[in-house]
Image (cartoon, rainbow, N blue to C red):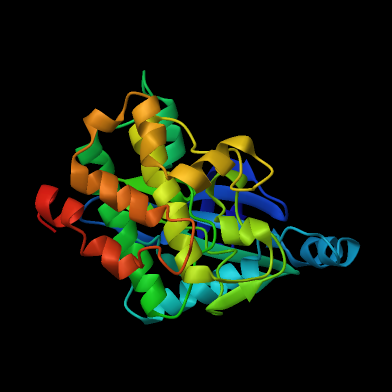
């Protein structure tokens, strides 16, 4: 099998990206004789030339593309701050022949989207969903505490590793509290203030995206195709809130009142009234049902 930097042996190609490839590799420099095992890592390979060419070819694109340089910087910042058990750990990075390599921990159980898709019914019990929410919110609070907003929270970016959830993929993250201009993230998860354009609070927008994750976990379906006033279902939610949607789907009774209140607070249309990530973690729905 091919090797990277005479240390990492490629054992599986995971996916292609806009700028290159993602591989699972054996870390030959981290052999554990006592266990007679070699640890595995994930390596994202990024063509810096291709990245520059795409940027030059689409200078006015209305959707912000993933930025591996930002991903590296945020990964480095998280690592230097001691890391967090609910954030994917970025272990190393290096550049060779105009190619950037990002080395991160291998989350052996895939992502949350794949996990839900593999179930007979693509949803969870409310208590299980609250457990996922609590873990991801904890990692997100750590990021926010470092002055970083993620801006691409989705099922696909929540990795699973031996029963633990880890938020990853920092390629759209920002240090700026106030952001604006281009669309950022995936349509299902994008906060209404991002869709509307103009300046927005990127940390409050993260809470909306995490609220959509929670909604999908308990219902098995996205709330709306996009949080835009051009979408009829969103106009209804803007007028009535999210709980009547759950009621009309016959799912309100499956959630305790505190969980409904938490979901409603995270999916508050007005970002000024929306819960902060600290308020999410302190909410009764988590403290009462999970004991966190």
**Residue at (29, 69) in percent of width and height:** 278
Above or below, 30 relative to 114: below
Q: Is residue 38 visible?
A: no
- For this orientation, the residue located farthest to the top is 120
- For this orientation, the residue located farthest to the front is 239
Above or below, 157 relative to 103: above
**Residue at (60, 38) in percent of width and height:** 225
Above or below, 278 relative to 42: below
Of 85 and 9, the residue lying toward us: 85
Residue 108, x across and y down, in percent:
37, 43
Q: Is residue 214 left or right of residue 235?
A: left
Q: Is residue 190 left or right of residue 118?
A: right
Of 43 and 257, the residue lying toward us: 257
**Residue at (23, 30) in percent of width and height:** 254
Q: Quadrant of the N terminus?
A: top right
Residue 207, x across and y down, in percent:
42, 60
Q: Is residue 122 left or right of residue 74?
A: left
Residue 64, x across and y down, in percent:
71, 62
**Residue at (10, 52) in percent of width and height:** 288
The quarter of the displayed image where residue 13 is located? top right
Q: Is residue 276 visible?
A: yes
Q: How many marks?
A: 0
- For this orientation, the residue located farthest to the right is 57
Q: Is residue 231 left or right of residue 86?
A: right
Of 186 and 75, the residue lying toward us: 186
Q: Quadrant of the C terminus?
A: bottom left
Residue 259, x across and y down, in percent:
24, 46
């Amino acid at each position: 099998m091919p090797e990277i930097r005479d240390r990492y042996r490629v054992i599986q190609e995971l996916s292609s990206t806009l700028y290159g490839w993602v591989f699972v590799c054996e870390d030959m420099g981290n052999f554990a004789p006592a266990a007679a095992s070699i640890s595995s890592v994930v390596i994202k390979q990024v063509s810096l030339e291709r990245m520059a060419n795409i940027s030059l070819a689409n200078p006015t694109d209305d959707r912000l593309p993933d930025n591996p340089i930002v991903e590296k910087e945020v990964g480095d910042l998280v690592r230097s701050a001691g890391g967090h058990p609910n954030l994917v750990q970025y272990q190393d990075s290096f550049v060779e022949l105009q190619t950037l390599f990002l080395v991160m921990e291998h989350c052996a159980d895939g992502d949350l989207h794949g996990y839900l898709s593999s179930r007979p019914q693509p949803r969870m019990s409310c208590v299980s969903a609250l457990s996922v929410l609590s873990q991801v919110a904890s990692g997100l609070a750590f990021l926010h505490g470092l002055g970083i907003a993620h801006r691409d929270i989705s099922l696909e970016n929540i990795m699973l590793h031996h029963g633990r959830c880890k938020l990853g993929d920092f390629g759209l993250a920002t240090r700026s509290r106030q952001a604006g201009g281009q669309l950022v993230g995936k349509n299902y998860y994008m906060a209404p203030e991002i869709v509307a354009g103009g300046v927005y609070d990127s940390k409050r927008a993260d809470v909306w995206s995490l609220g959509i994750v929670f909604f999908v976990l308990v219902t098995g379906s996205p709330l709306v195709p996009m949080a835009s006033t051009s979408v009829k279902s969103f106009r209804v939610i803007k007028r009535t809130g999210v709980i009547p949607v759950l009621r009309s789907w016959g799912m309100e009774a499956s959630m305790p009142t505190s969980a409904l209140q938490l979901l409603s607070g995270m999916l508050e249309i007005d970002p000024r009234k929306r819960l902060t990530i600290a308020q999410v973690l302190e909410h009764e729905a988590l403290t009462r049902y999970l004991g966190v």
